[in-house]
């Protein structure tokens, strides 16, 4: 019998406070991601009163809002949702790159899980596929990641 200890998160105790930071740009996609995230949280026993939704103009603004949320002590985990769709200019790379960097920074500096549910895709079709059709719902997946990471972080801190 192995004496190796394995620690991993689970979904058995999802009760906590969650903030969902949502970029409004590309709302025809992001609204589906939000629906998926809310559904996943509720299916795992999270009460509506324990969910706060904060809306930003776009994905570029998500990191600032998430930084404020993790600093506020009002949430145990954050789910960031948005959709950045490639166009014909370098704008995609700037927005996607800064969003990823900022969200990672917020999580690493606060110790609070920040789940990444921002689609970075080449086409609208790819975004639609990831917002509840062929490729599942990445908003729901981000919510599950937040639950699992919160469980894992709590175990590591105890």
Image (cartoon, helix red, strand yellow):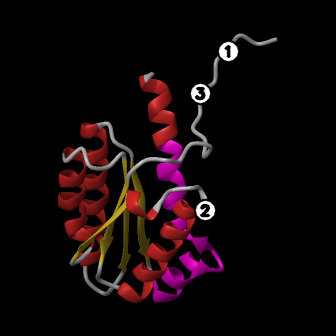
Residue 113 in the image: state x and y as whole percent. 38, 45
Name the spot of residue 66 as percent of width and height, x first. Answer: 25, 56
Q: In this view, does 99 lie above or below 158?
A: below
Q: Separation of disc 2 and disc 1 at Cα?
A: 33 Å
Q: Which of 89 and 10 is in front in this view?
A: 10
Q: Which of marks 2 and 1 is nearer the N terminus?
A: 1
The image's mark for residue 128 is none
**Which residues are the magenta region?**
123-149
Q: Are marks 2 and 3 in contact (CB under 8 Å)?
A: no
Q: Distance between the residues labelled 2 and 3?
A: 24 Å
Query: Residue at (44%, 80%) from the top-left corner?
Result: 122
Eye-nearest disc, 2 or 1: 2
54 to the left or right of 128? left
Residue 36's spot in the image, x, y percent? 53, 72
55 left or right of 79 in image: left
Q: Which SS class for mark 1?
A: loop
The quarter of the displayed image where residue 78 is located: bottom left
Q: Name the residue under label 2.
A: 43
Q: Do the residues labelled 2 and 1 touch (CB within 8 Å)?
A: no
Q: Which residue is drawn at 45% across and 34% down?
A: 153
The residue tagged 3 is 7
Quarter of the image containing the N terminus? top right
Judged by its main secondary structure, the magenta piece is helix
131 drawn magenta: yes
Q: Residues within 10 Å of mark 2 (few under 14, many from 20)?
A: few
Report the Cα–Cα distance between label 3 and label 1. 10 Å
From the image, tell me which residue sits under label 1.
4
Which of discs 2 and 3 lies nearer the camera? The answer is 2
Q: Is residue 101 above or below residue 23?
A: above
Q: What element carries label 2?
A: helix
Picture quadrant where residue 53 is located: bottom left
Q: What element carries label 3?
A: loop
């Amino acid at each position: 019998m192995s004496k190796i200890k394995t620690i991993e998160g689970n979904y058995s105790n999802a009760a906590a406070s969650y903030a969902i930071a949502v970029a409004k740009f590309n709302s025809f996609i992001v609204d589906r991601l939000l629906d998926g995230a809310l559904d996943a949280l509720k299916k795992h026993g999270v009460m509506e009163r324990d969910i706060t939704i904060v809306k930003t103009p776009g994905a570029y603004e998500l990191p600032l809002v998430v930084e404020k949320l993790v600093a506020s002590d009002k949430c145990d985990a954050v789910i960031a949702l948005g959709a950045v769709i490639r166009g014909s200019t370098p704008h995609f790379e700037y927005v996607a790159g800064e969003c990823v960097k900022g969200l990672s920074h917020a999580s690493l500096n606060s110790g609070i899980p920040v789940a990444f549910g921002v689609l970075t895709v080449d086409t609208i079709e790819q975004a639609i596929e990831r917002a509840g059709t062929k490729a599942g719902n990445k908003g729901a997946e981000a919510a599950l990641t937040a639950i699992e990471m919160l469980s894992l972080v709590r175990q590591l801190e105890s």
